[in-house]
Image: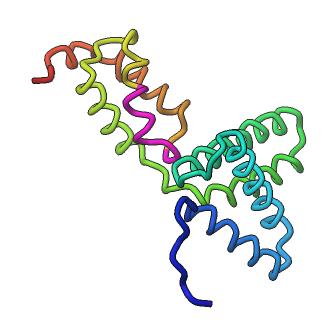
Amino acid sequence: MTDQAKPAGVSSLKQRIDQDIKEALKNRDSLRLNVLRMLKSEIRYKEIELGSELSDDEVISVLSSSVKKRKDSIQQFEKGGRDDLASKEKAELELILKYLPEQLTEEELSQIINQAIKETNAIGSSDLGKVMKQVMPKVRGRAEGKKVNQMVSSQLSFDPADNRSQTLK
């Protein structure tokens, strides 16, 4: 098969998922096939909702949402003593994570947060929303919103005096 130009508006992630579905079919990998079909379905529902093809960023958002659902399910199954179901969800989670960009380290995330705090002149927890609005588009798909929120909160309440002295031009 020859490499063809990507049609306008078609996400490379969607193409990768389609290719991997074909590969999973050939290899009779039922877990992978089921997860990929579910992802494709979620992407398609989002496209119908928006009325247009999804960009890679939008596909990443759908995948991130799916990751969050899996993590919540794992927690609930473990609380309920259903280790069999929790392990199935963990296997699905691992497959989905392969389609997301590499996750940011705490240090990288902290740098992005510090930059946003400086840019917004945030001085306390009341500025949490301003900072989150600045940070989330930069880290979407590469860090969990809950973790980002916790780090922003701790940095804003940690030493607000530092931020007051650093003003924008």
- What x and y, as percent, mark residue 32? 78, 66
Please tell me which residue is depicted at 52% across the width and 63% down the height of the picture.
Answer: 8
Query: Which residue is farthest bottom?
Result: 1
For the residue pair 42 and 68, the one nearer the viewer reads as 42
For the residue pair 63 and 112, the one nearer the viewer reads as 63
Please tell me which residue is depicted at 34% across the width and 18% down the height of the picture.
Answer: 158
- What x and y, as percent, mark residue 136? 45, 34
Query: Could you tell me which quadrant the C terminus lies in?
Result: top left
Corner quadrant of residue 163:
top left
Q: Is residue 125 above or below residue 7?
A: above
Query: Could you tell me which quadrant the N terminus lies in?
Result: bottom right
Q: Is residue 151 above or below residue 4?
A: above
Q: Is residue 137 magenta?
A: yes
Give the magenta range: 132-142
For the residue pair 8 and 81, the one nearer the viewer reads as 8
Q: Is residue 27 magenta?
A: no
Q: Is residue 102 above or below residue 123?
A: below
Q: State left or right for residue 11 relative to residue 126.
A: right
Q: Is residue 152 above or below residue 49?
A: above
Q: State left or right for residue 81 relative to residue 65.
A: right
Please tell me which residue is depicted at 28% across the width and 13% down the height of the picture.
Answer: 123
Corner quadrant of residue 14:
bottom right
- What x and y, as percent, mark residue 69? 73, 39
